[in-house]
Image (cartoon, rainbow, N blue to C red):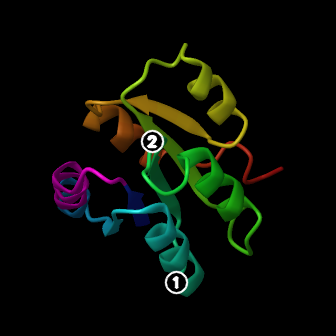
Amino acid sequence: MNVLIVDDNESAADLLQELLSLQDHTAHCCYTAQQGLDAAAARHFDAALIDLSLPDLPGSEVARQLRSGADGQSMLLVAISGYSEQDASAAQARALFDHYLQKPIDFDALDRILAAPRAHAAA
């Protein structure tokens, strides 16, 4: 699977990229929202892991823009946040993302998400 990681915490993003590569995924890190949007416009990604708190745009806006693109409806979007799922920003993100993971990321949960077939792919 080709995975886009958008997180301003460069160390965390780079570690996640390494872990994904060990699972035979190809991952590309971007550290700003704009870098992530540019990368998604330049190549195809099967999934995107997006931090909700980015310095230049909220992660929810990145998701909204990705969803409006050519690959957006088929792309698996996973919100990543330091806030709990009950936080107001998480509730807003629910409508745009397929999954929500709280930091620190449970890599086993992420692995299951990436391995599972898309629920709405048949829809």
Q: Mark 2 and mark 1: span between their CA atoms?
A: 24 Å
- Point out the stretch of residues depicted in magenta: 7-18
Q: On the picture, is 65 further left or further right than 88?
A: right
The residue shown at (68%, 30%) is 92
Left/right placement of residue 72 relative to residue 17 reads right
Q: Is residue 37 above or below residue 43?
A: above
Single out the residue that lies furthest toward the front: 56
Q: Secondary structure at mark 1?
A: loop
Residue 8 figure quarter: bottom left
Q: Amino acid at mark 2?
A: Ser
Q: Nearer the viewer, residue 113 or 36?
A: 36
Image position, residue 88 (x, y; %): 61, 20
Which secondary structure lies at badge 2?
A: loop
Answer above or below: position of 65 versus 89.
Answer: below
The residue at 62%/60% (across/down) is: 75
Residue at the spot 19% in from the left edge and 59% down from the top edge: 14
Residue 27 x/y as whole percent: 32, 67
Contact, CB < 8 Å: mark 2 with mark 1? no
> The N terminus lies in which quarter of the figure?
bottom left
Residue that mark 1 sits on? 43
Quadrant for residue 83, please give it. Answer: top left
Q: Which residue is tagged 2?
A: 53
**Farthest-out residue, right:** 123
Q: Position of residue 64 (x, y in %)?
A: 70, 54
Foreground disc of the pair 2, 1: 2
